[in-house]
Amino acid sequence: MKILAIYPNREGYGRVPLGLSLIITLLQNAGHRVEIFDTTFLSNGNIDSSTREELGFVLQTDMSFLYESYTSSAIDELFRAKVKEYSPDLIAVSIVEDNYRYAHRLLKVAKSISKNITVLAGGSTPTVAPHIVIENPYIDYLIQGDGEEAVVEFCKLMERGKSVEGVRNLWYLKEGVAKGNPLRPQSNMDSLPIQNLGLWDERHFIKPYCGELYKSGYYEMSRGCVHKCTYCINHSLENVLRDAGRYFRRKTIDKLVLEIKMHLNEFKWEMIFFCDDNFLSMSTDSCIQFSRQWKDEINIPFWVNTTAESVNARKLEHLKDAGCNGISIGIESGSEWLRENILNRKIKNDRIIKTFKLIHEYGIRTSSNILIGFPGEYEEDVFESIKLAKMLQTNNQDVTFVTPYMGTNIHAIAFMLGYITISEEPGFRGFAEGISMRRPSIKVPQLSTEFLEKIYKMFMGYVNGKIPIPRRFMNSAPGADSSAPPRGECGKDVSDKMKELILSMSKGISYEEMIKV
Ligand code: B12
Ligand code: SF4
């Protein structure tokens, strides 16, 4: 069967998307012909990186030589020509919410050429809101959750002209009504194939890091996370996938090392980036075993994402020895009240400060993430984040606006409080309009857009000490930590609602019931 995979990457963030890469590999291994339409390098450069460079979050690296300069309508035309020339039986598209509108635009082009091309979607957005995404007029089927086994079964049946309606994880419309099949167990990570990277544009392998470019490979050791932060997709993925078994999964170190070794000769990686949400959520013994095996068999620098709770001195000692070059930790806010009551992250600032200090003592680079614009957040809370970032002095500091992704508690609360503009369009029902990490999408009454935009631009100035922190924000904000004065009623309405939502989710109440979309 002829399959066209679409990677609708609007923001130009170069890096092979692991999920789609595995799907393509499995389809090729099953004997299908696959080609990719990948928009990553077609226009505008990497908007995300250039914004971060401009605001001083990361070092500048000239990447312009990687990008072409097609306009949106020229990209539509390229896509139209591709669909006409290749004439696929199936379009397989991977969707995250930021790129959903863009994917929709391309799928409309495909369906205008022929309504007979079947469109199959997958990814985090179809997974958390399948009953909504399946109403999209340009999507025929979607696969909820891990797609590896389901996509192969789907294509086998489709190729033989048989009904696909019994495929587990599949959603489709039957007489206008959304039908979702039961879920199969989560993929066994040790039986996943070695990614076939041959189809991907080699520009994906060139990654800027600390002002230099590295030939980089992207791998995963685990999927999921044990935490349930209200702004992150993980709690909602876990909620919708509860019938598929334990959400957090890991592959064996042997399997991971084998996979990377298989690529090393061909691709000559200089750096490995792990895609895991929380790479270090393994025991200290496993981390030591990983580090030893990495040093013996791979021995190239690597970078991981994790949480402050997962870091300890013994892990760091071995990771450093194995070549760990960078650790990224999302701290999200410097206000303990906000973190605990709105974000559902109970870690204290002291612990975060100690963790970063320790990582720096081992000579490992750090980056951290801060989010601004939470429902229930006040200007004082934003300055607590600035003060914490100033104390941490990480090598890279990223700041983004809170994004109310469908299915998350933050979306639910913003929806209930009327802080977001909601779409009514089929396929997007209930989604927040104008979503972006680089501009405010939630209208929090006590945080004006003007304040948020200004603080976003000035953030690094405060952190580097170039701009003094205004006197009224110098002392701890009410409720900022246990030594600060009480917070009073500030944000209490939001935190009470948030508690209810978290409780509902823990009881397995579906998102549709919670917000009635
Ligand atoms: C690594 C990573 C990246 C990588 C790779 C992106 C990618 N598309 O895979 C990079 C750095 C490029 C990236 C960029 C971005 N990312 Co990112 N990223 C992640 C992260 C941490 C892991 C993703 C991953 O590799 N998972 C492992 C793979 C195997 O799982 P998977 O991708 O879900 O794929 C499986 C299924 O979904 C399904 N599937 C996926 N695609 C398809 C397609 C078909 C046809 C089928 C049948 C099945 C299928 O099968 C796969 C195998 O089981 C996730 C967090 C998370 N927990 O998912 C965030 C996440 C996906 N990213 C997110 C965001 C916002 C972005 C950016 C917009 C950020 C930015 N401003 O640049 C861009 C968008 C780029 C893009 N077009 O995808 C959000 C998306 C939120 C949402 N609700 O949609 C997430 C969920 C993090 C979060 N905030 O909660 N990201
Ligand atoms: S710790 Fe990070 S990955 Fe885990 S749920 Fe929270 S934000 Fe998501």
Image: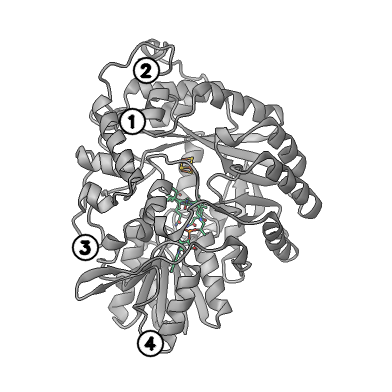
Picture coordinates of residue 435, whole percent (x, y) = 32, 47
**Separation (CA) of disc 2 from disc 3:** 42 Å
The answer to whether mark 2 and mark 1 are in CB contact below 8 A is: no
In the figure, is residue 422 to the left or right of 274?
Answer: left
Nearest to the eye among marks 1 and 3: give it: 3
- Residue at x 73%, y 42% (from the top left corner): 288
Going from N to C along the chain, the mark reached first, 2 or 1, is 1
Q: Which residue is mark 2?
A: 479
**Separation (CA) of disc 4 from disc 1:** 54 Å
**Separation (CA) of disc 4 from disc 2:** 61 Å
Q: Which mark is residue 84?
A: none
Q: Which mark is residue 452?
A: 1
Nearest to the eye among marks 4 and 1: give it: 4
The answer to whether the residue bearing label 3 lies less than 8 angstroms from the nearest atom of ligand 1 is no
Which quarter of the image is occupied by the C terminus?
A: bottom left
Amino acid bearing label 2: Gly
Amino acid bearing label 3: Pro
Going from N to C along the chain, the mark reached first, 4 or 1, is 4
Q: Which mark is residue 162?
A: 4
- Badge 3 crowding class, 10 Å Cα cut-off, few under 14, some 14 to 19, many 20 or more, is few
